Image (cartoon, rainbow, N blue to C red):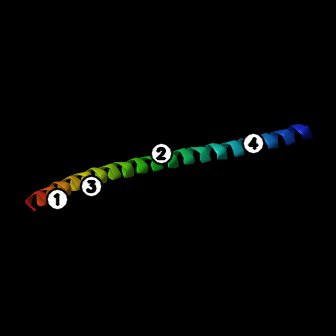
Amino acid sequence: MCKQKIIAEKLERIAKILDELQYNEIDIVTSIQRNQALIIKKIDKLQEYNEIDDMNQSVFAKRLQEIEQKI
């Protein structure tokens, strides 16, 4: 009887630990998904910035070429 009680208590502790691990895993997955969404937004902004920068460089190069031709 005593061994069964000890085993039951240990199983209960194991179940509590497993529940806690599962909760932590869910929390980590949720956090990763949020971070992934944020990273994707930042990458999109960076691509947009690079496109704008490319357009600026193109305009600058064109103006510089016009100035060089006038000189």
Which residue is label 3 attached to?
53
Tell me: 67 left or right of 51. Answer: left
State the quadrant of the C terminus: bottom left
Regarding mark 1 in the picture, which secondary structure is present there? helix
Sequence-earlier tag: 2 or 1: 2
**Structural distance between the alpha carbons of marks 3 and 2:** 30 Å
Which residue is label 2 attached to?
33
**Structural distance between the alpha carbons of marks 4 and 3:** 57 Å
**Structural distance between the alpha carbons of marks 4 and 1:** 73 Å
Sequence-earlier tag: 3 or 1: 3
Tell me: 39 left or right of 56. Answer: right
**Structural distance between the alpha carbons of marks 2 and 1:** 46 Å
Tell me: 1 left or right of 32. Answer: right
Q: Which mark is residue 14?
A: 4
Regarding mark 2 in the picture, which secondary structure is present there? helix
Q: Which marked residue is nearer to the observer: mark 2 or mark 1?
A: 1
Q: Quadrant of residue 4?
A: top right
Sequence-earlier tag: 4 or 3: 4
Which residue is label 1 attached to?
64
Mark 4 neighbour density, 10 Å: few (under 14) some (14–19) many (20 or more): few
Residue closest to the eye, 8 or 46:
46
Q: Which marked residue is nearer to the observer: mark 4 or mark 3?
A: 3
Name which residue type carries label 4: Ile
Whole-percent x and y of residue 30? 51, 46
